[in-house]
Every structure is written in C-alpha cells, then in structure tokens.
C-alpha cells in the first residue's frame, strides 16, 4: 500500500528553550486508510495536523503527503498543493457567511482554475450526495450545524483530494447529527477516501477508523497504539 502521509523523525519547536510540540514523530497512513489521532489537550495533535496540511513547517524531519515532500515547497506552492491534494474539515465549519452554499463549495475548484461548468457539475454532485442540494442557494447562517458541516465536507471533497483531514468534525453538532456525520465519514472511507481524523472522542475514532494513534507530550505513544477495527461489530454500532 502506498503511503498518502509519511512523517519521518518530525520535530517541531516554537520555543528553542521549551519542550518540543512534536518530538521525533514518525507516522504513515496508507491510501484508502482511515486513522485517528488522539491525545489530551496540548499533546501536539493540532501541530501534527498543521504540519501535514502544510500550514506549518517542522523544525527537523520530513513530511511527505501524496508523494510530495512538503519541505521543498514555497508558500505559494504549498497553497496550490493543498488545493489539489488535501481536503480539510473543521470543528466550526469555517464557511464564508456572505457566500451561498453553492459558492462556498465551488471556491476550491475556482481557485484551482477549474472551469465553471465542470466545477458546477461537481458541486451539484456532492450536494446531492450529501443530501443538501435543496440548500444550494441558502446562506450558512440559515442552516443547522449538521447542514453546515455537510457543506464543509462537500467543499473539502470538491477537488477530489487523495487525503481528507478532519479536526473534531462532530464537536460542534448535536448527538444525532454527530451520528450522521460519523456514518458519512465511514461511507467516504469505504468508497476509497483516505482519512486522518483528530478527535477527543474515542467512540467516533473507533467507529470511523481502523487504527488509533495516540500522542502524549509530543510523542507517539507506541504502547498505546490500538487497532480500532478490533472492536466487535456490536461495539462499533454502539459507538455510532
């Protein structure tokens, strides 16, 4: 299996005299794989996500995503790379309130130079798939939290990225909506989408992913690695 993410001995320091936010972290995620990253607040999860997304750079070590080493890319090249290769889902949606649902979803494709006709076709496909096509002309403020998260997922998938990064994707929605988002992430992975999920929710991690990686004090805790898929089908269903 080809790796869609590979981190080799990655260290990140924000303060030369303080502890490392990440310390010699190694991680590999294969194509079509779903992996959860868990750990207490301040453990380095957000730093890890930012490095994989090319939003930050390691102090040492290498980050490779979709076969490209991010270390040699300029900021402009990193922005182009993200548009093509990484979809991001955030806890609080990060939608633009002055744009309609359709225009929010179209934005990555339009920034990437896709023709309007092709982009519109892809957006209509995604909005239909996610069950929110009737809201295409609505503004985010008029949608529920679950609907806004579905718009955010459609936007993240717009350019068919090989990697989907999800940061607490059910953290800002109610329990019932959280179950729907969980089911959607499971379906996306079954359809072949590689997924890296950062969460505090063990039930979400176990339901959506086949492997859980735990980070403690900036290091991957090898002793705490677990195969999420090892739980029974009944337990997985209960987690959802």
Image (spheres, grey):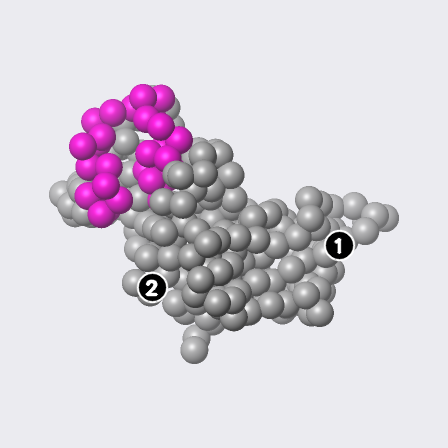
What span is in magenta? 126-153
Prevailing secondary structure class for the magenta stretch in the rendered image? helix
Q: Residue 190 carries which label?
A: 2
Helix, strand or loop at disc 1?
loop
* Front-most of residues 238 and 46: 238
Residue at point 35% right, 22% down? 141
Q: Which of marks 2 and 1 is nearer the N terminus?
A: 2
For the question of whether residue 202 can be seen, the reply is yes
Does 18 appear in magenta?
Answer: no
Q: Which residue is situated farthest in the right direction here?
A: 17
> Which residue occupies 29% across, 24% down?
139
Marks 2 and 1, Cα distance to the nearest angstrom?
A: 32 Å
Classify residue 151 by image quadrant. Answer: top left
The image's mark for residue 101 is none
Left or right of 3 on screen, residue 123: left
As displayed, is residue 9 above or below residue 78? below
Q: Residue 178, percent across and down?
A: 43, 42
Confirm whether residue 11 shows in the render.
no
Query: In this figure, which residue is indicated by the disc labeled 1?
Result: 217
Say which of 214 and 165 sits in front. 214
User: SS class of the residue under badge 2?
Assistant: helix
Q: Does the magenta stretch include residue 152?
A: yes
């Amino acid at each position: 299996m080809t790796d869609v993410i590979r981190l080799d001995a990655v260290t990140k320091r924000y303060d030369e005299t303080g502890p490392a936010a990440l310390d010699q972290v190694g991680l590999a995620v294969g194509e079509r794989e779903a992996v959860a990253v868990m750990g207490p607040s301040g453990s380095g999860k957000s730093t890890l996500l930012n490095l994989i997304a090319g939003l930050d750079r390691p102090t040492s070590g290498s980050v490779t995503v979709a076969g490209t080493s991010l270390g040699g890319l300029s900021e402009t090249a990193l922005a182009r790379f993200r548009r093509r290769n990484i979809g991001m889902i955030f806890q609080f949606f990060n939608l633009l309130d002055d744009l309609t649902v359709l225009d929010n979803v179209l934005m990555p494709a339009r920034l990437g130079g896709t023709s309007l006709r092709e982009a519109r076709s892809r957006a209509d496909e995604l909005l239909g798939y996610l069950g929110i096509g009737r809201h295409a002309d609505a503004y985010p403020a008029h949608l529920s939290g679950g609907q806004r998260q579905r718009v955010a997922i459609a936007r993240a998938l717009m350019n068919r990225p090989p990697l989907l990064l999800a940061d607490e994707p059910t953290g800002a929605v109610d329990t019932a909506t959280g179950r729907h988002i969980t089911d959607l992430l499971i379906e996306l992975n079954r359809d072949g989408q590689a997924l890296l999920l950062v969460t505090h929710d063990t039930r979400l991690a176990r339901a959506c992913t086949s492997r859980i990686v735990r980070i403690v004090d900036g290091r991957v805790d090898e002793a705490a690695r677990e195969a999420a898929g090892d739980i029974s089908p009944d337990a997985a269903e209960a987690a959802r």
